[in-house]
Amino acid sequence: MYMEAKSKIRVAAYCRVSTADAAQASSLAAQRGYYEAHIQANAGWIFAGVYADNGKSGTGMAKRTAFLRLLADCEAGHIDLVLTKSVSRFARNTVDCIEAVRRLAKRGIAVYFEKERLHTLSARGELLLTALSAVAQEESASKSRNIKWRYQRDFRRGVYRQGKMPYGYTKANGCAFVPDADKADVVRRVFRSFLNGESPARIAEGLNRDGIPTPAYSAAWTARALYGMLRNERYAGDMLLQKSYARDGDETYRRRRNRGERDRYYIQDSHTNLISREEFKRVGEMLDGAAGRLYGYAVRNGVACINEAQAACVRKAYAAYAEGASIRGIAHSLLMGAKAVRSILKNGQYMGGVRPAIVPAALYERVQARLRGGEA
């Protein structure tokens, strides 16, 4: 018997699978069916629901929405007993597991782990649970190490298991990186518009205006999304592997950008390209030039934007020169070198295009006319 006898107790079940593939989804459906039938077959129980997380890791609680809903319903007084398959299904993190069990125990709510035959309100419950959850956590860490080793081995061989396809590609007949005809044309439009001098913000406006379907994760096209697309080597038919990594010993398994802490692997011609490698290289060079390396600009969240303090100096230089001031005089007033001021006045990138505009085209042309006249 799971609990001491009382008039009817409300019983719920929790189940979880760690990946969202078809086989595990089938397993989850079977678990739900089992628990629903099992609870309803007991005359002393009232079925209080099955809470199921699909494709969620047991190493942390933050993204396990069904688990958090279960705890909330328990604390709201809707459940008296929770059934679950095993400690590892409930939580692989010792701290999370013990914390959740204690929260429920304070309200007289028990958790019964079927595999271990462990009742958390029994005399030996918490002591044994601590040991079992520690074992589950170590098993999870060992599994993670094995998976990392396998990925590293595959990376060195040039083998990569692609999950979600980049915009413009799909999976077909078991093959990844199959061009999606319509979306591939959108990708080409983005790259060629950029090469023709349009900024990502302007390109995004055009795509939204034309009603072009967006990536699944976004409600609208944005400059930031297009910067990511323009930097993605997979559109040139190549792959850079291990762009991010999870730090060893980090129980959250939060991924970090790989800035050289781990080896990276570059594979050329791994799949069908949507743009040429030459186009991708030219785009990269243009983006590098736009990445805050020009006076008057900065980069925030990967997007080139205006540095207002520096841009104010650029505008002053243009306005003063157009009104007849000398380059030397402008340099003196702005505390800059005359060579730097002349470079600013001759740079057509301040009219915009790849970057946001700082100087109106008409003012730029007035300055160029004076420069061509040889006026200092």
Image (cartoon, grey):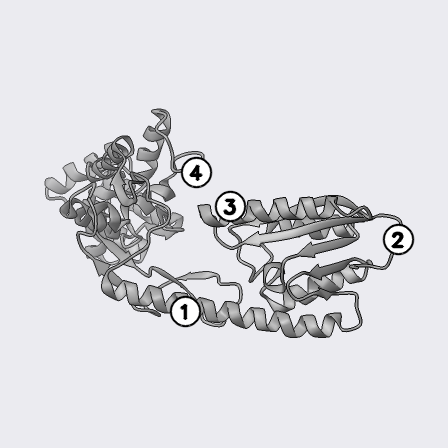
N-term mark: 2 or 1: 2
Are dots 2 and 1 in contact, CB under 8 Å?
no
Label whose residue precedes the other's in the sequence (1 or 3): 3
Disc on res. 218: 4
Mark-to-mark CA distance, 1 and 3: 25 Å
Check disc 1 and give the amino acid type. Asn
Residue 337, located in which quarter of the rendered image?
bottom left
Residue nearer the viewer, 116 or 291: 116
C-alpha separation, residue under disc 3 versus residue under disc 2: 35 Å
Residue at (14% x, 47% y) in the render: 278
Residue type at numbered disc 4: Ser
The residue that mark 1 highlights is 146
**Residue placed farthest to the top in the image?**
210
Type of residue at label 3?
A: Ser
Mark 2 or 4 closer to N-term? Answer: 2
Instruction: Determine crowd level at label 2: few under 14, some 14-19, many 20+ residues with C-alpha closer than 10 A.
Output: few
- Rounded to the nearest angstrom, the CA distance separating label 4 from label 3 is 29 Å
Q: Does label 4 or label 1 sit earlier along the sequence? A: 1
Residue on which disc 3 sits? 26
Task: From the top left corner, tell me how far across and down residue 128 is, in percent.
Answer: 70, 73
Pointer 2: what residue?
6
Q: In the visual, does 311 lie left or right of 372?
A: right
CA gap, disc 2 to disc 1? Answer: 47 Å
**CB atoms of marks 2 and 4 within 8 Å:** no
Q: Tell whether label 1 touches label 4 (CB within 8 Å).
A: no
Comparing labels 2 and 1, the label whose residue is closer to the camera: 2
Distance from the alpha carbon under mark 2 to that under mark 4:
51 Å
